[in-house]
Image (spheres, rainbow, N blue to C red):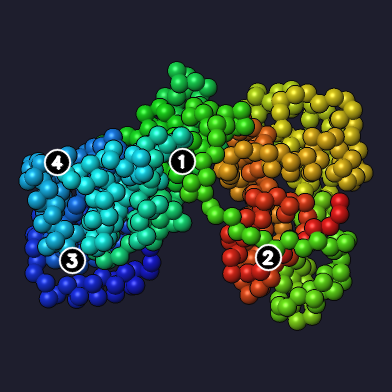
C-alpha cells in the first residue's frame, strides 16, 4: 500500500531529518545486515528504498528514545512473536535500534532494580509505551500488580509522559480472551480506559513485522501511520486474510477441505468449510507470516480464527464451522460500529415517476438531491439539479438460472471447476433448474437478481413441478416477483437477510458499471463468489445478507461520481433494513439521508 506519493514522503523525511539536526546521533546503524533489514521494513510501510539512507540517519538520531513494554493480562504470545524476529539479531533490535529498557520478560534486573529502571525512564527519558495485555478493572483491578501499583494505575502513571502509545496484541487492543463473555476478570482494552491516541496492533499474537514496522514508522515520521476505524495501521490491516491467502484460488473454484484429516488439505484446498474466518478478518498474516516467516496458521492447516478482530472469541460462533445461524453463539457489542440515526419520512403513496420526484424534491431545502429507488416494482436513480431530473440507472438484465449456470461450461478452468462442484454439491437443485425453459427474462429490476441467486443457492432440495412451472411463467411472461413461490420472493429474501445473526458481510463484488452518464449492475462475479460461499457452507441467511449489503455498496459507487449531492432520498423495501440504512449513513455522514416509507 502506497501511504502517499513518493515526493511527499521525501519532503516529509527531509523535514524530519532537519528537525533532528541539532540532536546527537546516539546509535550507529551502518552495518549492511542492519540496513537490509531496515529496507525490508520500509517496503512494508510504503517508504521507497531510495530513501533508505535518510531513514537510517533519522533512526541514528532516535537512539535516545526508549521503549517501555508493560505486561498486563496476557499469555506473553506477543513477546514470543517479537522474539522470533529473524534479522537483524534480536539483540541489535532491542539494544541498538529501539532501546528497550523495560520488559519484565527480557530484562536482567528484577524487583526493586526493575522498578528503579522504570521510574528513572519515566522521570528523565523520552519513551514510547507498549502495552501487552488487557487491563482488569473494578473488583479485579488488583489481579495485575506491578511493584506497588495495579495494572491500571501503572499504565495511567506512564501513559501521559509517553510520546506514543501502542496496544500490542488483541488483549490490549480489544480486550482479547480475558474479556470474552462473561468477562470474569473485567478486562478492558486500553482505548476503553484512556483518552489519548492509541495505535492498536491486534493479533493473537500479531506478527513481529507488524509490531516492529509500525514502531519504525513512528520513529521515522514522529507520527502514527494512517489508521483504520479500529485504530489499526492501514499498511498492515487494510486487506482481508482471504484476499491475501495462498488457498484463495481453491475457494474460487469451490474446492474445500471437508475435515482436518482431508488429504486435499495438502493440495491447498480452501479451509472455509472447516471454519476459516479469513474473509471477515483484516490482517497481513499470509504476507508476513510468523517465526522468521516460516509459516502461518492457514499454511499449517487450520483456518483463520479472526484474532485481529474485536470480540472474535464471542462473535464468530463455532470456530471450526462456517458462518451460519446454526453456529451462532452470541454477539458482543463492544467495538461494534455506533448506530447512526437516519431520518425516516412517511409518505402516503410511493414516488413512481420523475415528475413525482420533482414535486417532492422542490419541498427539500437543498440544491441537489439523489433519489435511489430500489422498490420491488421498479428501480430508478434520479439526480435532481437545477429543476431537472436525470435518470442515472438503466438496468437491462437477461435472466434465467438454467442459462446462467450453463454459461460456466465455456468459462476458464476455474469457472468450470466451480460449476462441476456446484453440480456435485447441489445436484438435486441443479437437476431441477435444468428442467426450466430456455427463455431469458428481460428485466430492468435489480431485485430480480436476488430471486435468481436464491433459485440457484437457497438449498439443495429438488423443486416441485409446480414451482418449476411458476418460475417458467415468471421467465416467459415477465411476471412480478410476487408471482414466484415464497422462497424466491424479494420480501422473503430481505427477511432472511434481516434474520442473519452475524454482522459480517461475505463480499460478493457487485459492481455498477458506468456507460456514459448511466449505470448498469454487473453481477457475474457476484454469482461465482456466492456459489463458492454457499458450497463452502455459508447458509442462505448469510447469502441473502451479503447480497443485499453488496448491492447497497454497489449503489453507493454512484455517489462517488456525484459527490456534490447534499441530500440522498432512499425508497424501497431494501432500505427498511437497519443494516442497509447504516451502510449509507456510515459512508455518507456529511450528507442528509431520508428514507421514504409508504404503506405496503
Q: In this view, does 429 lie to the left or right of 181?
A: right
Which of the 4 image quadrants contains residue 565? bottom right
In the image, taking residue 242 as reference, residue 418 lies left or right, namely: right
Residue sitting at 14 percent across and 52 percent down? 118
Q: Report the Cα–Cα distance between label 3 and label 1.
A: 38 Å
- Is the residue under label 2 in contact with that under label 1 (CB below 8 Å)? no
Between the C-alphas of marks 1 and 4, the distance is 30 Å
Q: Mark 4 points at which residue?
A: 106
Relative image position of residue 39 (x, y in whole percent): 23, 56
Q: Earlier in the sequence, mark 1 or mark 2?
A: 1
Frontmost of labels 3 and 4 is 4
Residue 4 percent location from the top left of the image: 38, 66
**What is the count of numbered marks?**
4
> Quick one: 360 or 535, which is closer to the camera?
360
Q: Which of marks 3 and 1 is in front?
A: 1
Dot 4: few (<14), some (14–19), or many (≥20) neighbours within 10 Å?
few
Residue picked out by circle 1: 311
Q: Which of 435 and 174 is in front in this view?
A: 174
| C-beta proximity under 8 Å, tags 4 and 2 | no
Q: Which of marks 3 and 4 is nearer the N terminus?
A: 3
Q: Which of marks 1 and 4 is nearer the N terminus?
A: 4
Residue 156, how many percent across, how many down? 27, 55
Tell me the crowding category of disc 1: few under 14, some 14 to 19, or many 20 or more residues within 10 angstroms, Cα based. Answer: many
Q: Mark 2 points at which residue?
A: 593
Quadrant location, the N terminus? bottom left
Task: Residue under label 3, please give it.
Answer: 58
Amino acid at each position: 500500500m502506497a501511504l502517499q506519493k513518493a515526493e511527499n514522503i521525501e519532503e516529509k523525511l527531509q523535514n524530519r531529518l532537519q528537525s533532528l539536526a541539532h540532536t546527537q546521533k546516539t546509535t550507529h546503524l551502518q552495518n549492511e545486515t542492519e540496513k537490509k533489514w531496515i529496507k525490508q521494513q520500509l517496503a512494508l510501510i510504503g517508504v521507497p528504498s531510495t530513501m533508505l539512507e535518510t531513514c537510517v540517519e533519522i533512526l541514528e538520531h532516535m537512539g535516545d528514545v526508549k521503549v517501555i513494554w508493560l505486561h498486563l493480562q496476557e499469555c506473553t504470545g506477543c513477546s514470543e512473536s517479537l522474539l522470533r524476529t529473524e534479522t537483524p539479531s534480536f539483540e541489535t533490535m532491542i539494544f541498538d535500534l529501539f532501546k528497550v529498557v523495560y520488559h519484565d520478560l527480557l530484562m536482567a534486573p528484577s524487583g526493586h532494580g526493575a522498578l528503579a529502571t522504570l521510574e528513572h525512564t519515566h522521570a528523565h527519558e523520552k519513551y514510547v509505551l507498549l502495552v501487552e495485555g488487557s487491563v482488569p478493572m473494578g473488583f479485579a483491578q488488583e489481579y495485575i500488580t506491578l511493584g506497588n501499583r495495579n495494572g491500571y494505575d501503572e499504565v495511567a502513571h506512564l501513559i501521559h509522559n509517553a510520546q506514543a502509545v501502542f496496544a500490542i496484541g488483541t488483549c490490549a487492543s480489544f480486550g482479547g480472551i480475558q474479556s470474552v463473555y462473561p468477562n470474569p476478570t473485567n478486562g478492558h482494552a486500553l482505548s476503553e480506559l484512556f483518552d489519548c491516541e492509541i495505535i492498536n496492533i491486534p493479533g493473537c499474537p500479531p506478527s513481529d513485522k507488524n509490531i516492529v514496522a509500525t514502531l519504525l514508522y513512528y520513529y521515522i515520521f514522529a507520527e502514527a501511520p494512517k489508521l483504520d476505524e479500529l485504530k489499526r495501521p492501514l499498511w498492515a490491516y487494510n486487506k482481508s486474510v482471504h484476499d491475501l491467502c495462498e488457498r484463495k484460488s481453491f475457494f474460487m473454484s469451490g474446492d474445500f477441505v471437508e475435515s482436518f484429516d482431508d488429504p486435499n488439505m495438502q493440495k491447498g484446498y480452501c479451509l472455509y468449510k472447516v471454519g476459516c474466518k479469513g474473509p471477515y478478518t483484516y490482517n497481513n498474516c499470509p504476507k508476513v507470516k510468523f517465526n522468521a516467516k516460516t509459516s502461518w496458521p492457514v499454511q499449517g492447516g487450520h483456518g483463520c480464527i479472526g484474532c485481529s478482530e474485536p470480540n472474535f472469541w464471542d462473535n464468530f460462533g463455532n470456530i471450526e464451522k462456517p458462518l451460519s445461524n446454526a453456529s451462532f453463539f452470541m454477539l458482543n457489542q463492544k467495538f461494534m460500529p455506533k448506530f447512526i440515526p437516519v431520518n425516516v419520512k412517511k409518505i402516503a403513496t410511493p414516488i413512481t415517476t420523475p415528475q413525482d420526484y420533482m414535486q417532492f424534491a422542490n419541498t427539500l431545502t437543498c440544491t441537489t438531491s439523489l433519489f435511489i429507488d430500489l422498490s420491488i416494482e421498479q428501480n430508478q436513480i434520479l439526480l435532481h439539479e437545477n429543476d431537472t431530473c436525470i435518470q442515472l440507472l438503466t438496468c437491462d438484465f437477461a435472466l434465467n438460472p438454467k442459462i446462467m449456470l450453463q454459461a460456466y461450461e465455456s468459462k476458464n478452468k476455474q469457472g468450470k471447476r466451480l460449476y462441476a462442484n456446484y453440480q456435485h454439491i447441489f445436484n438435486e437443485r441443479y437437476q431441477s433448474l435444468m428442467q426450466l425453459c430456455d427463455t431469458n427474462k428481460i428485466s430492468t429490476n435489480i431485485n430480480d437478481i436476488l430471486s435468481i441467486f436464491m433459485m440457484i443457492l437457497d438449498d439443495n432440495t429438488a423443486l416441485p413441478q409446480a414451482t418449476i412451472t411458476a418460475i417458467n411463467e415468471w421467465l416467459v411472461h415477465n411476471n412480478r416477483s410476487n408471482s414466484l413461490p415464497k422462497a424466491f420472493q424479494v420480501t422473503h429474501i430481505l427477511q432472511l437477510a434481516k434474520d442473519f445473526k452475524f454482522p459480517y458481510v461475505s463480499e460478493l463484488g457487485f459492481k455498477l458499471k458506468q456507460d456514459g452518464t448511466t449505470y448498469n449492475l454487473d453481477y457475474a462475479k457476484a454469482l461465482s463468489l456466492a456459489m463458492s460461499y454457499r458450497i463452502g457452507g455459508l447458509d442462505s441467511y448469510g447469502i441473502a445478507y451479503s447480497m443485499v449489503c453488496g448491492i447497497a455498496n454497489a449503489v453507493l459507487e454512484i455517489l462517488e461520481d456525484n459527490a456534490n449531492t447534499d441530500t440522498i432520498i432512499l425508497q424501497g423495501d431494501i432500505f427498511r433494513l437497519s443494516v442497509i440504512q447504516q451502510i449509507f449513513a456510515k459512508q455518507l455522514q456529511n450528507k442528509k439521508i431520508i428514507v421514504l416509507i409508504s404503506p405496503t
